[in-house]
Amino acid sequence: GFEVTERTPRGFAGRWGEASNATFANTLRFEAPCVLRNDNEYVDKDGNKNYSSALFLCRPSGQGKSMLIVRFGSTQFNSRFALIPDWVIHQTSNTVFEQDMGFLSSQNEILLRKKVPTKDLYLNLKSCDTWVTEYRRWLDKVG
């Protein structure tokens, strides 16, 4: 699950992962209006500490629209990834992001129309994305 370590009007931070796995730490920080950083720290089979991160930024690109900018980084590079053309990774990622954005936009339209907190409109299952649950809590609180 996702354990919240900080909540402010500007966003929240926390860590997630398996509590039983001491070789893997994952932290996440969200800052409004749209900065999300996900950092991983892990120990490989040889005992070396490695890091990877993903940074998601969005900026307005029109009325009701935004552009998502995503950057990934890692201290350990898998040579198999070098064989995959950049356009394939870009196209695959965009498909996932577009599906998420379509879903989130339709949810947002309903929330604006109904004028109720997300907790009153949607049932968050324990198996759902716990980060999304925390984001909805934050959004209900700060509006």
Image (tube, rainbow, N blue to C red):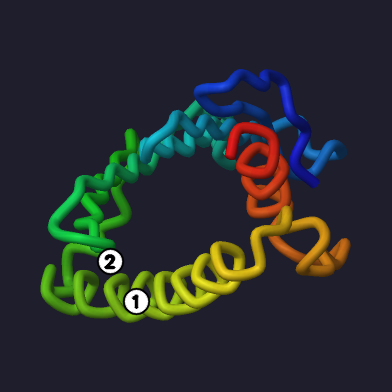
Between discs 2 and 1, the one toward the N terminus: 2
Image height of 98 relative to 29, above or below = below
Amino acid type at mark 1:
Glu
Q: How many marks?
A: 2
Which is in the foreground here, disc 2 or disc 1?
1
Identify which residue is drawn at 75% across, 65% down.
128
Give the quarter of the image for residue 102: bottom left
Residue 97 in the image, given as x and y percentages of width and height:
37, 70
Mark 1 secondary-structure assignment: helix
Q: Is residue 116 above or below residue 35?
A: below
**Contact (Cβ within 8 Å) of mark 2 with mark 1:** no
Q: Which residue is mark 2?
A: 80
Pointer 2 local density, CA inside 10 Å: few below 14, some 14–19, many at least 20: few
User: Disc number at residue 98?
Assistant: 1
Q: Position of residue 15 (x, y in %)?
A: 68, 32
Q: Which of these two is toward me, 43 or 104? A: 104
Distance between mark 2 and mark 1 Cα atoms: 26 Å
In the rendered structure, which amino acid carries the disc numbered 2? Answer: Arg
Q: Would you say 6 lies left or right of 55 here?
A: right
Figure check: 87 above or below 52: below
Query: Which structural element holds mark 2?
Result: helix
Query: Height in image: 107 above or below 136?
Result: below
> Looking at this view, is 44 or 40 the one in front?
40
